[in-house]
Each structure stands twice: as structure tokens, then as C-alpha cells.
Amino acid sequence: MTVSSRFTRLFTLTLSLIIAALAGISLYAALALERSLIPQLDQKMLTMGLTVNAKLDRALRYGIPLERLPGVADFFGTVLAADPDLAYLVLTRRDGTVLHQYGTSLPKPEQLADATAATLKMLPASQGAASADPAKEPWPIQALTARPLGDFYNLALPVGSGEAVAGVLHIGADANFVMQKIQEILFDIATVFVIATLVAFELLLLIVHHYLITPINRLEMVLSHIADGNLSHILPVSRDETGWLARLLNQLVERLNAAHQQILRQAASLQSATPAAVNRLSASLEQLWRGFTLAPKGRPAPYQLADLFGARVATFLFIFAVELSQSFLPLYARAYATDLSGSPTPLLISLPLTVFTLTAALSMPLAGWRFERAGSSRTFTEGALLMTLGLAGTGLAWGFYDLLAWRMLTAAGYAFMYVACQSYVVAHAPPQKQASSGALFVSGLMAATICGPAIGGILADHIGYTATFGCAAILAACAGLMAFRLLSAEPVPASPPRRPVRGGVVRAITGNGRFMLLMLFAAIPAKLLLNGFLFFLVPLTLSEFGGSRSEIGRIAMLYGLAALFLGPVFARLADRFALHGLLVGAGGLLAGIGLIPVFFFPATTGVLAGVLLLGIGQAMSISSQLALVTRIGRASIEQFGQGPVLGSYRLIERLGGASGPLVAAGLAAVFGYPGAITITGLLGVVTATLFSVSFLILGIEPEPDDELSPIAS
Amino acid sequence: MLVKITATITVLIAFVLGLAVLMNYAKFERTFNGLMQSRLAFLVQDLRDTLEFGLDLGLDPAAMANTAAILTREAAQDPHILSISVFNEQGRILYQYQSKLLDLHPVIPLTPAWLEIVLQTASKTPQHISDPETLMVGIPLINNFGRTVGGLILRYDRSFHDQELQQTLFNLIRAALLILIAASLVALLSVWLLFRSTRHELRQVCIALEDFLENQQRPASPHAGDSVLAALEVAAEQKSQEFQQRLILAGRILHLEQRLAGQAPHGSERRREGV
């Protein structure tokens, strides 16, 4: 059995256990809740029944027969309207005939007749014949409990007339009352399952790689080195089976190196005593050592294999921490903005989001500089510290302005951690695996984008904003600790000699018309839509529609799900059929079109469709956009290298993203939230159309004869 | 490795169960509170209707003689009702029902601030307030000219409410822990079975290498198994043996050189013995 099939089995096992655990606890919760809630429901039905009964009884005391009472059904309707937990109120005669009734759903008449007969049978003879007035002679309340009646719990109360019982009042609640309550959290349970699946995948991948695959790979590498005569490496020793083998291998390598050193020392002393033998001895020994590589000075170096999965899990954790608040951040900011100015403008509400995106974009170069000097582990740990403080501060902020400061701190931490992880992967990925290593980083990021908003919404709903920010801070700290442990052994990658290229790159790319068209009509609108719509307008709009924070989180999760699962599919299609331009245009159009109906159909479903189409549209366009950047900017890449060109592209894109909440807030101030969504969508459609038309006319790369007269110079 | 993988699965299941317990408990708490609050609100609204009927007839709240009897009758519906108070617009208590439970466990008296909250309420919707010992439901009394002439507050024993919530939380946590223990045991067993062959392979290679280290002169061991690791181990053993042969050769060369240089310890000894 291969390691990958073993991992698949392990993953399946974990999922099965998670499903079983969720099913078990849900079933138990259903039973436990039923046990506790049904007596409460009973008591409520009794309270209401006695009150209604007293009113009917008063009418009877005035000598009005039950069947002649006017407006009883309306009265029942008023009582039921005030309480959605109850299903019906029915008044029957002693023989079970229905006199008055009201309810959303009702039991069958024969069931009511049976229940009436059963109730009358239970009455003490004296009460059946004489007074049953609760005001004068209290009913034995404890004896009156609801009983199952078809699809309902039914409580039957005799209505006394002073002489004899004149009828029976039936109060009903849905028998599935508790199950309905449990069903209301089924979406949340399903969300937890999706998140648990992704978290399980990430953690198991890390554990299996860190404790099994990487140590075995290391063992195989060192064994194959020894088999090739290379005796210069030893292995880190852990406390498990691989560690045992590593210890033995180290013994072998160290013993051989020690014996070799001893021979060298003897040879050296001999050579110093008899200089005549130097050449002969050296030649003989050199011939003997041929085909073997020994450790310098007899001290073998530990064999290190970069743990890219560690970087992936660290990425997953810190993005998870940031995304935890994504689904409710505008609602949280609105609360602070309300304290500041009574009825805050959308612009004010958008500020924390804008400040975050802008600070993150502007901190990236600083983070890159720090990475080159301090290495990935230290940069990441510094970022984790900043983010932990920032998130904790956000949760405990005492005013709008310090909330902005905490968001800036969080964003700086985010930039440091992002750059540390991305650069670590780039620096340590084998040259032939650069693309797949990059994908490893992106997958961790996308998985966290799915989990964060959804779980954040659930947590905010149940434990509040401050505690959720506290959880986010703990996650960021955990990411820091994990990175410190997993990335610390790595040396700081040697930085290539720096060239003063930034100004040159900026001149080169601003002079490239196609590059600027791509930025203006594809890259910036994509980020604008993402930050303006998904992160700002969606929470506020859904909150306006009455959606809970859990619901907002679930809907925001759809974007990540679409991007995670469809992104690789579209990327493969684009590469295979060279469809990069088409997919960027079509993706932009789809993302924009999805938002347009919201103004005309302002409902949760419309926003949900918009988020889903945005996810699909961006899954189509994002990887193709990167491919277009490398094609369109080929000349600049050849001149300045890929890093500076892609860095400039990312910076422009992020600055566009920072403008997203501001643009969306400006539109919302004029047109309201649904209107702002529609106009943002129209903006997306217009820019995608302009992009498509421009590149249909110009082509992605200049024709040979165009090169003589560049379109923008 | 076995323990670490099992621990990871256990942590994951604990995370899932923790969230499930949190959600179920939150739902229970909301439903339980909803049922209790709506029941008490209904009681208070019914009392208000009864009292306002008197007000509509032009009676002064202080002069409604049957109020105390009405309060006692309503309070009889639930033994956990601690008190029902009717007060005028100045906040002076006019009538009050007090449960015998209050003699045994007195609670903080009604504060003017709470009465003020009820009197300030513009709507006819009951107001829910709570303190560490009681749940309170209050509602203003409004005459047929729309003027607030007083209010009423019902206080309910919180210990019963809190005990129910705690009991349910305890039951949910206990069930989650039992499920977690069972799932962890299944995980431990499954992981052990799943990685048994890997451990076996590693152990075989270890034994072969240990054997080789103890007795380096023997030919490379073929019993390390047929995995890639085992094949590499055999190749590494062979190369090590080759290197050891070279070390022996180097030793011999050194010995010869020493003898040639007249430095060999045995040669000098012998020469000395000969002298």
C-alpha cells in the first residue's frame, strides 16, 4: 500500500469518525432537548389554556352557551398570533363536536372527539357534574399534561359552566416542536462538517507529512546518499520508529567518518615524520577514497528537507484567524461607528476594512525587506505577534479610532505572515516543483477562506464578537508557534544581489498598454468586487434582510468553495486550450452579471446567487490573469526578473482592492445596499466588456509588425 | 507517530463536538428562554388586561380591591413565581403577592430603576429584565386615555431556570466526552492497523541495520524486506562494507609505510629486542 493510499484511508477514517460523532451528539441533543423542553412547553400550554378557559367560563357564567359565543375563533387567532410555538386552539362540546377552532394546522375531528372523551373520563365525578370553575375550585394542575394526538401535543381542559362541564378546550403544539428547533441548526451542523473536513485534511496532511512522509523521505535520501558513497549527512532523531532508524544510520555514518578521520590523523603524523612518503601516501589514500564523499572534519551535517506542508498549515491557520471576522466585520464596525456618530454613513463603516486592505498592501514591501534580512521563521513570528495583538485589540476596542489602529496592526501582521509563507515556499521549493509548491500555498489559503467566515459567523452568533476575536487571536498565536517550530530550522535564503529596479519596473509596466489594460479592466475590478461586494456589502445587506451572522458566514463560504474546487479545473482548461484571455473576460462578466439582479430581487437568495457567481467568475479569471501578466509582461520579466514585475502587479491589484469598500460605501450611501450591489455588478460587466473588446482588437501579444509601433510608449 | 496521528484525530473530533455542543446548547438556551419568557409574558399580559378592565371602568388602581386576590390566583399557576407587584406612576407599590419561598431565600428588593424601565415603556410589549437571582417581566398599565398610570412586575425564581440550563449543558458535555473517548479508541485501533505494515517495514530495516552495525563483516543482509527503504538499506550496507574494506586497506598501507619508515611500533620493538 502506498503512502498516498494510506493517507486516503486515514482521511476517510477521520471523516467517518467526524460524521459518527456529529450524528451521535445531534441525536443525543435531540433527546436531551426534548426531555427538557417538553415540560416547559406543557407548562406554557397550561398557562395559556387556563387563561383562555377563564375567559370562556366568564361567558358561560353570564348564561351564554358555548355554541352561541360570538368571535371565539377571532379571539383564538389573537392568542395564537402572539405565540408562534402553538399550533391551534379548538373548543369542542362534551360529545366532541367542534364548536370553534383556529390554527395553522389542526388535528382530525375524530381525534379531537376521542381526546374530549378521554378528558371527560379522567374528571372526578364530582367535578364532571358540579362546578369546574378554576376560579372557585382550582383544578389539580399537575394532573393536566399534554398528550400526543396525531401530529400534535394536545392539552385538553374542561370548560365548566358552574353546573356541569360544557365542553373541552384543546390547545395544540406541533409534536415535532423540538425536532424543528434542532433542524434550525442543521445548516450550522452541516457547515461545521464542511469546515471539519477541510481542517482534517490540512492537519492530517501536516501530521502525516511531518511525522511519516518527510522522515521516510529523509531516510531514503540519506540511505541513497550512503549507497552512492556520500557519508556527509546525518539525520534529526525523533522518538519513534523513524527516529530509531535515523539513530542507527547516524551511528553508521559517524563511525565510518570517525574511522576515516583516524586514518587521516595517522597519515598526517606519518607524513610529518617522513616527508619523503608524503606524495606516495597521499596518492594511495586518494585513490582509496575515490567514489566516497566524507564529512568535512569528520562532522556530518544534519540532512534538512524543507517542510513545505508546515508553511501550508501555518498559512491556513493565520488566514483562518483573519477570515474569522470577515463575515461580521462591517457589522462590528457599524456598532462602533454608531457610537461615534449616531447614524453612521456607509463610508464610515467601510473605513476599518479599507484601512486593513490598504495597510496590508503597503506593508508587503516592508515585509519582503524583513524576510530577506531575518528569514521566514522570524518574519512569520513577528507577523503572528502583530496579528495576535491586533485581533485581541480589535475585540476589546473601546472606540472607533482605536479600532482603526488595531485593524492596521492586524493588517501589518497579515502582510508579514503572508510574505513569510509565500517567500518560504518560493525559496525552498525544488525548481522543477515551483508551480505545485505555489499551489500548495494557495490551497491552504483557499481552505482557510472557506472555513474562516463560516465558523466566525457561528461563533459570533453564539459567543459574541469579543470572544470570536479572542479565538482569532489564539489561532494567530498558534500559527506563530507552529511556524517557529516548523520553519525555524531553515536557514535564511541567500538573497540575490539587489538591483535598483523598482522605478524601472514601474516605468516599464506603465509604458506597456496591454499591461495597463489588464490592470484597469480585469485585476483591479476583480479585487474591487471581492472587497467591496463580498467583504463589505454582503454582511450589511444580509443583515438588513434579517440574516444571522451564521447565515452571512455560510453564504460568504460559498465564494471560497467555488474558488477552491473550480479554480484548478479552469486553470487546467486555460492552460490546455490557451483560453486565458477568454476566461478572464468571461469570468469578469459572470461575476458582474451575478450581482445585477439584487436590486430588482432584494432577497437573501439573490445575494447568495451573486456570491456564488462571483466565486465561479473569479475561479475562471484569477489563475488566467496571472498567466496573462507573465505573457504580457514578458519583456519586463526578462529585463527585471519575475519577482519585481509580479510584485508590482500584486501591489496595484491590492490598492484596487483597498478602494473596493470605499466605492461600495459611496454607492450604498446613494442607492442603498441592494442598489450598490447592482451598480458594483454593472461596473464589473462594463470593465469586463472593455477588457474583452480591447484584447479582441489588440490581441494578447503584439503582432510582429506591431512591435515597430507599440500601442503605448 | 501512532499517538500523534490519533491525537490529531481526537483534537479534530473534540473541535467538532465542541462546536456541536455549543450550537445545541445555544439553541436549547434560546428555546428554553423563549418558552419561559413567552409564558411569563402571557401571564403578565393577562393580568394587565384584567387590571386595565378595572381602569377602563374608571377605577383608581389603588382602589381596585380584588387586585390582591387576582395576583394570588395567577401566582398559584407556578410555584416558582416569587412575587407579583402592582405599582402606581410614582413607583409606589400598591399591591404585592409574595411567595413563601422569599421567607426562606430573600432576594434583592425591587429597585426604582426597574420600575422606571417599565413605566418608561411606550409599547404594550412586556419588558424582560434579569438580575442574578430572578427573572423579571414588567408591563405598564395604561388607561383608556392612553396614559400610563402604573405598572406591574412579576419576578420568577432564576435558580430553577439556571439549574435546567446547567443540567442540559452538563448532559451534553458528558455525552460529547463519551463519544470522544469512543471515537479516540476507534481511531487508535484503526491507525494502528493502517500503519502496522509501515512500522513493520521500518522495524525490519532497523533490525537489519542494527545487525550490520554489530557484525560489519557479514555479507549485506537480504532480510530487510522488499520495500524501497529496505533496498536502499541493503545498498547502503554494501557501500559501507566497501568503505570499510578501503579503511582496512588504508590501515595496511599506513602500516607498510610505517614499517618502511622504520616507525612501525612492532618493528621498533623487534629491533630493540634484537639489540
Image (tube, rainbow, N blue to C red):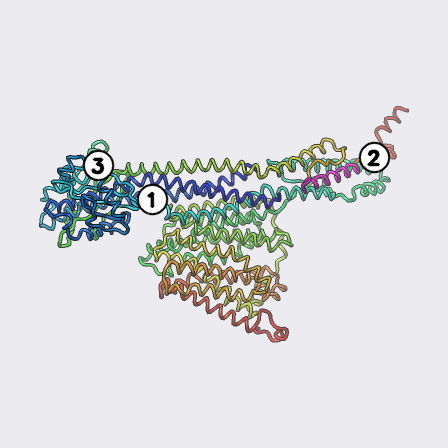
Nearest the eye: B210 or A61: A61
Residue B230 falls inside the magenta stretch: yes
Say above or below: A254 vs A608: above
Q: Earlier in the sequence, mark 1 or mark 3?
A: 3
Q: Residue B27 location in percent, x, y? A: 35, 45
In the picture, the disc for residue A368 is: none
What residue would you read off at disc 2? Answer: B252
Badge 2 crowding class, 10 Å Cα cut-off, few under 14, some 14 to 19, many 20 or more, is few
Label 3 crowd bin: few (<14), some (14–19), many (20+), radius 10 Å: few
Q: Residue at x 35, y 57 (%)?
A: A545
Tell me which chain the residue with mark 2 is part of. Answer: B
The percent coordinates of residue A564 (x first, y second) are 51, 55
Furthest toward the right, the residue is: B275
> How far apart are the alpha carbons under marks 1 and 2?
89 Å
Residue B10 in the image: state x and y as whole percent.
Answer: 49, 39
Q: Is residue B83 above or below residue A500?
A: above
Magenta segment boundaries in residue numbering: B226-246
Residue A88 colored in magenta in the image: no
Rendered location of residue B133, percent (x, y): 27, 38
Read off the residue under disc 1.
A178
- Distance, label 1 to label 3, CA atoms, is 28 Å
- Which circle marks residue A122 in the picture? 3
Amino acid on which the number 3 mark rests in the picture: Met
Number of numbered discs present? 3
Q: With A410 as the anchor, is B53 left or right in this view?
A: left
Quadrant assignment for the C terminus of chain A? bottom right
Q: Secondary structure at mark 2?
A: helix
Q: Determine the secondary structure under disc 1.
A: helix
Give left or right: position of A355 versus B275.
left
Q: CA distance from mark 2 to mark 3?
A: 112 Å
